[in-house]
Image (cartoon, rainbow, N blue to C red):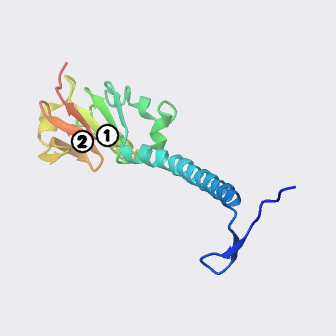
Amino acid sequence: LHHESSSFDLDDQGRFASSNTQENTVRASNIAEQERKTIFRRLIISLIFMVPLFYISMGHIFVTGDTHLGIDIPKLNSKNFPQGCHLTKDDYVIICGDCGLTWDKSRETQYWVNWLSNKPWTTLCIDGNHENFDELYSIPCEKKFGGNVRRVSDSIFYLNRGEVFELCGKTFFTMGGA
């Protein structure tokens, strides 16, 4: 019978270690496999946490048609637009025309301005053919999102016609009217 001889040496920390090369190879292979599994597990965990962070940080843009103030605006309530509950002020709802938030200074108009202002998102409006342009144009212009806007409240803006805007890394051209 032949027995493979083993000799023992001291490792870097002064412990006895086998100098049997076959044993060392198997041990190194096992350690490498454990390291690979650990790294792979960490990668998966990192990806699981990274995807929601990208989702949160990217911002969202929702686009809808006319709201005609009190007529169609309930389509933005939490029952009809449940996604809105999870948005932030860094997310945008764009109303394409006939928003009506500058129609007059009535209590009803002010109610809807306050209602939209209290939503978790930022509302952007593009004027349509059913706007009170005298009232709209009485609001001073300011630069925001890369173009000229008219601020109705801290989270409601009319985007001026013929302007280019940058939102969430996307470029938008606005052209109001019917």
Left/right placement of residue 89 relative to residue 171 reads right
> Which residue is identified by label 2?
157
- First along the sequence among labels 2 and 1: 1
Image point 71% across, 59% down: which residue?
Answer: 23
Callout 2: SS: strand
- Disc 2 residue crowd, few under 14, some 14–19, many 20+, Cα 10 Å: many
Q: Quadrant of residue 112?
A: top left
Image point 60% across, 55% down: which residue?
Answer: 32
Left/right placement of residue 12 relative to residue 5 reads left
Q: Are marks 2 and 1 in contact (CB under 8 Å)?
A: yes
Compare residues 117 and 84 and report the one nearer the observer. Answer: 84
> Which residue is identified by label 1?
123
Q: Is 102 placed above or below 153 here?
A: above
Left/right placement of residue 147 relative to residue 117 reads left
Instruction: For the C terminus, give its image quadrant.
Output: top left
Percent from the top left, x then y, of residue 13? 62, 79
Percent from the top left, x then y, of residue 11? 63, 75
